[in-house]
Amino acid sequence: MSGDPDDLPEHVVANRRHWDDTADEWVAMGERAWAHDDPSWGVWGVPEAALEMLPADMTGLDAIELGCGTAYVSAWMARRGARVTGIDNSEAQLATARRLAAEHGIELTLIHGNAETVPVPDGSFDFAINEYGAAIWCEPEAWLREAHRLLRPGGQLVFLANHPLAMACAPESGAIVVDRLVRPYFGMHTLDWRHVEIDPGGINFCLPVSDWVALFHRLGFTIDDLREPRAPETAEGVEFFVDAAWASRWPSELVWKVRRR
Ligand SMILES: C[S@@+](CC[C@H](N)C(=O)[O-])C[C@H]1O[C@@H](n2cnc3c(N)ncnc32)[C@H](O)[C@@H]1O
């Protein structure tokens, strides 16, 4: 266990409780994702061929997943040849990750801790990634500064997060997105779902696009790409706070690819 709860920020303590309490609900999804090696991303399962989140060959690369959950992304990277470290704030999520790594015979270094303060030396990695991990559960400046410290010069960071347009259309009650703007876009940062009426959750973060860009520049990243995954026409139903019809018209997710200068 890393991090005396008394020394951790409020959102890290609250989110640890949330994920330890709900980890059971993620086991089946983790098992499915570990079982195949054709990555697909985000809640709409957009294929790797469309998003190009992972280098095809990661042989010899040191890679880290920041907020790895059940660590299927870590598994995909290890199968591509990388030496992989995963860090997660929830010991219960890591228990699933450890079991699946053992069952699949894949060697991962798994750390219990906060992705805003990773107990690993500067410049340890060539590649960093997360899909709905640190990207939405960690304070943006804190985890991006840490990702920058962890990467070697030229190292790439790729992450998938909620799109701020979807957040601007997400009612404060916790109900699913609507087709109008219901909260301010400018100034968006912390979204506290702990006490909402519908499906309470943890504390998330989301920035306007220009705030992400400003942060990248200030912290020493250059931008390689920005993608806005679209729900395929075959997608149906509701995933978390977004329905497929909405996400086929407007972006519910974004992918940033940035590089340490
Ligand atoms: C949605 S999962 C991401 C993993 C996987 N890609 C997935 O979608 O299932 C979110 C993970 O972020 C972790 N997390 C939340 N706050 C974190 C923090 N401060 N540091 C590291 N991990 C954190 C949670 O414990 C959880 O396992």
Image: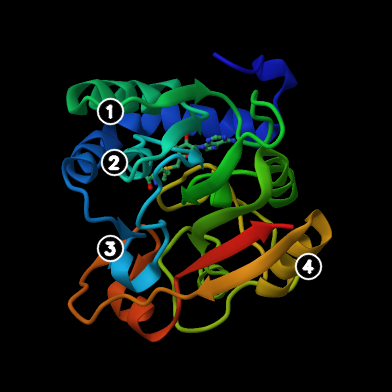
**What SS does tag 2 mark?**
helix
Q: Mark 4 CB in 8 Å range of ligand 1?
A: no
Residue 114 can be seen, yes or no: yes
**What SS does tag 1 mark?**
loop
Q: Nearer the viewer, mark 1 or mark 3?
A: 1
Cα gap from disc 2 to disc 1, whole angstroms: 8 Å
Q: Amino acid at mark 4?
A: Ala
Position above or below: 12 against 237: above
Cα gap from disc 1 to disc 4, whole angstroms: 38 Å
Q: Are marks 2 and 1 in contact (CB under 8 Å)?
A: yes
Q: Quadrant of the C terminus?
A: bottom right
Q: Which residue is mark 4?
A: 214
Q: Is residue 53 left or right of residue 8?
A: left
Q: Are marks 1 and 4 in contact (CB under 8 Å)?
A: no
Cα gap from disc 1 to disc 3, whole angstroms: 23 Å
Who comes first in sequence, dot 4 or dot 2? 2
The percent coordinates of residue 18 (x first, y second) are 47, 33
Disc 1 residue crowd, few under 14, some 14–19, many 20+, Cα 10 Å: some
User: Considering depth in this image, is 12 or 135 the residue closer to the camera?
Assistant: 135
Q: Quadrant of the N terminus?
A: top right
Q: Which residue is mark 2?
A: 79
Cα gap from disc 3 to disc 2, whole angstroms: 20 Å
Q: Which residue is mark 3?
A: 45
The percent coordinates of residue 243 (x first, y second) are 32, 71
